[in-house]
Amino acid sequence: MRFQALACDYDGTIATDGRVDDATVDALDRLARSGRRLILVTGRELDDLIDLFPRLDLFDRVVAENGALLYRPGEQERVPLAEPPKAEFVDMLRERGVEPLSVGAGMVATWQPHEGTVLDVIRELGLELQVVFNKGAVMVLPAGVNKATGLDVALAELGLSAHSVVGVGDAENDHAFLAACECAVAVAGAVPSLRESCDLVTEDVVELARLIVDDDLADVALDRHDILLGDEVKIRAYGERILIAGPSHSGKSTVAAALVERIQEAGYQIILIDPEGDYAEGLGDAVVLGDPERAPTHAEVLRVVDDSSRSVVVNLLGVPIDDRPGYFEQLLMRIAAVWGRVGRPHWLVVDEAHHMVPEGFHLQSSATLDDAGAVLAITVHPGSVSAPVLSEFTAVIAVGDEPAGVLDAFNQAERPEVPDELETGELVLWRPGDDPVQVTLTPSTGERRRHIRKYAAGTLGDDSSFYFRGPDDRLNLKADNLNLFLRLGEGVDEDTWEFHRGNGDYSRWMAGCVKDEELAAAVAEVEQSGGGVDEGRARIRELVEERYTAPE
């Protein structure tokens, strides 16, 4: 269920001449019984509203006075969201004949044509106030207080995200709160500017409630939320199941980083499963749980997810490789309950998907992916991903020099013709049933320096460290970060250095464990160049230090 709540205006939206008819009450009740939450967002003062509408119990929260007051109907509690009006301001308005004049918990209201007098008094007293118009009403509030800010507070109390909300209104003061909602709706009688800016116009809330309950607004185009991939090609913000696949050094991580960055910038909550610790330094303001020494508990993950404003990275370096699918499966089942209750996290991102959902991953758990809003999985081995899981994906992004093989592993029965190989930065997006689209990736706007963490000792786990062993396994020198790799590389004997260089071990480690495909490609050229030992060591050090702060 994408839409977990309806946020609606009162006058002109659910009420006519201040009264709500029985058909609208029944429609709201049907919405509540469908498991959705209801939030009333109005410019009216609360006492006035209580006198007019005896069914405030239908609503989980009421935002009154245009965002200045929050009301909890179940507890009959009032929470001021703004400073009360200053007495000198109110007194001066009355002295200048501003009538009618009502004073609420945080708002002062009158009617046109008194707006000129109101503005004069604000200037004379030097107050930081704003004037909001609503079909002839003139509302005065502290700067920065509006229906959108009040809705934010209500959603936070309910554990909901605005990305899971349908908002509906009719007037000028509804612009801000509707723009904050994932789906903005205007009723037929709304002011023209509001109708033009909304995703949907309905006759009334009765019709809107029917559309929400019947099919969760499945037929409403919400492409304003789409996520850019490249060349004006976008992916949907909801309902996508996308697999990014290709060989090592092909740019999978670059594609994933660009999409994840834009998903997070759009305000969607992400839970990112990180088997290799590649996001140990974080993802924007995401909370990172787990490290090489300790696996995060499921309860820890759920506590972060409870805050709709925070994304979470689940670092599984502390979980043995063979135990990771089981850990993920159990976490997935617990997250599914959160999806059902609040419709988030909006995106599940699974790195190294062939390790997390290998062949044999349970069918029941695979079907649980349907509960997720959207899924992004990254793998170098699409053929090793559980077949039931692959069947849940709606699209594949192929990168590298074997796009046909990627598409073949994804869906052999329908696989279309694609180029033999792709240039760096190019990809193929394919949805079975449609023609493939070749796209030049729009890269992330800020390079994510995710590997700086490797300067600290112990960042990489045993399975992802580099081991200088040399011919016949004479050595066993462990480098668990780039800093130590460079220092050990300077000190090992020439035979050991050349043994690993000849086998391409350095570039393979940097691609597979360090997850830096560009660095790996440059190091591979050094490995294949055949220069001297000292020259090779110096060049690889130089390449590492070009991309990372030089180790002290």
Image (cartoon, rainbow, N blue to C red):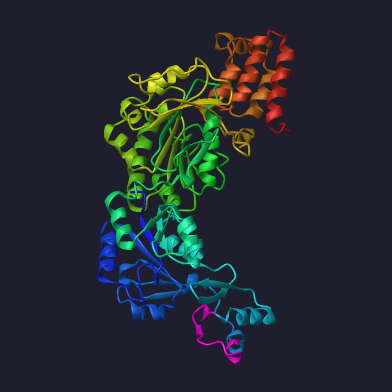
Q: Residue furthest bottom?
A: 95
Q: Is residue 179 left or right of residue 537?
A: left
**Which stretch did the figure color magenta?**
93-112
Is the residue 253 above or below the residue 57 in the image? above
Q: Is residue 116 left or right of residue 71?
A: right
Percent of width and height locating residue 13: 38, 67
Is the residue 260 above or below the residue 107 in the image? above
Toward the viewer: 171 or 531? 171
Is the residue 349 above or below the residue 489 in the image? below
Is 8 a magenta residue? no
Percent of width and height locating residue 536: 71, 14
- Picture residue at 51% right of the left edge, 64% below the top: 149
Toward the viewer: 187 or 30? 187
Quadrant occupied by the C terminus: top right
- Picture residue at 50% right of the left edge, 86% below the top: 100
Percent of width and height locating residue 15: 35, 71
Q: Which quadrant holds residue 527?
A: top right
User: Is residue 468 shown to the viewer in this render?
Assistant: no
Is 94 a magenta residue? yes
Toward the viewer: 239 or 100? 100
Q: Is residue 517 left or right of residue 491?
A: left
Toward the viewer: 280 or 217? 217
Percent of width and height locating residue 453: 61, 36
- Picture residue at 74% right of the left edge, 14% below the top: 535
